[in-house]
Image (cartoon, rainbow, N blue to C red):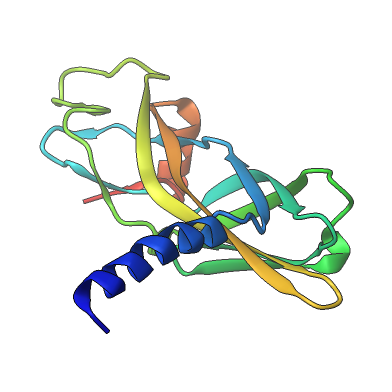
Amino acid sequence: MPANLRLAAFVILLPVAAATQSVSSGELILAADRPVIDVQTRRAGRNFVQLPAVDFQFDVRPVCRAGMLPKSLSLNIADTRVVLPENRFDGDSPIAISVRIPASQIAPIALDGFCAVPDTLQPEPGQLLHIAGVLSVQASLRCESVDASAVVYASSALDVALRCGTEEASAEAEQGDSVGTR
């Protein structure tokens, strides 16, 4: 095949391939809360905080294209996976999902100066620090009809808020259940 003919075939096929990829299989909308985690005060210079297990609440809205029905939905966060079977889908209503991520699946967070004081000072109780992208969630929705199936993917960063020096965190520290520091 001559070079100019190959180029013409490529130019003609390129828009066709792009149009085929734009056909939607559906939509998967994820909305996650931002949990607030109590952190005990720590000495200055201890910059890494290991979070405890974190509970995330999701509102998920799975939408399959016309003629298809949702068959399963999976959420993956770190090494935690939640799979919902088709009997959990109720029309177009959002689905509330709770996912608990164990502390061992969350990397320590580097904090410089937050909730850390010299021995003679006390931090302001209740001070908040928002941390973006501590974890991420990957979700997939499998849609099926009598003669076809499709998968829709979505991904989102998960944020947390840290609250400094509350009485709850201090009480938990005494019981050994608090946020650990390194």
**Any part of residue 3 in sight:** yes
Quadrant in the rendering for residue 32? top right
- In the rendered view, would you say 153 is above or below 118? below
25 and 121: which is toward the camera: 25
Left or right: 4 with respect to 72?
Answer: left
Query: Dividing the image into 4 quarters, which one contains the N terminus?
Result: bottom left
- In the rendered view, would you say 91 is above or below 165? below
Residue drawn 88% across the image and 65% down it: 87
**Any part of residue 77 in sight:** no
Q: Give percent across and percent down for residue 96.
A: 74, 46
Left or right: 132 with respect to 123?
Answer: right
- In the rendered view, would you say 164 is above or below 60? above
The single residue placed furthest to the left in the displayed view is 45
The single residue placed furthest to the bottom in the displayed view is 1
16 and 77: which is toward the camera: 16
Total marks shown come to 0
Left or right: 42 with respect to 136?
Answer: left
Q: Give percent across and percent down for residue 144.
A: 78, 70
Residue drawn 29% across the image and 73% down it: 5
Q: Give percent across and percent down for residue 118.
A: 13, 25
- In the rendered view, would you say 141 is above or below 123? below
Quadrant in the rendering for residue 13? bottom left
Left or right: 89 with respect to 158?
Answer: right
177 and 164: which is toward the camera: 164
Residue drawn 38% across the image and 57% down it: 106
Q: Give percent across and percent down for residue 165.
A: 37, 27
Residue drawn 41% across the image and 51% down it: 135
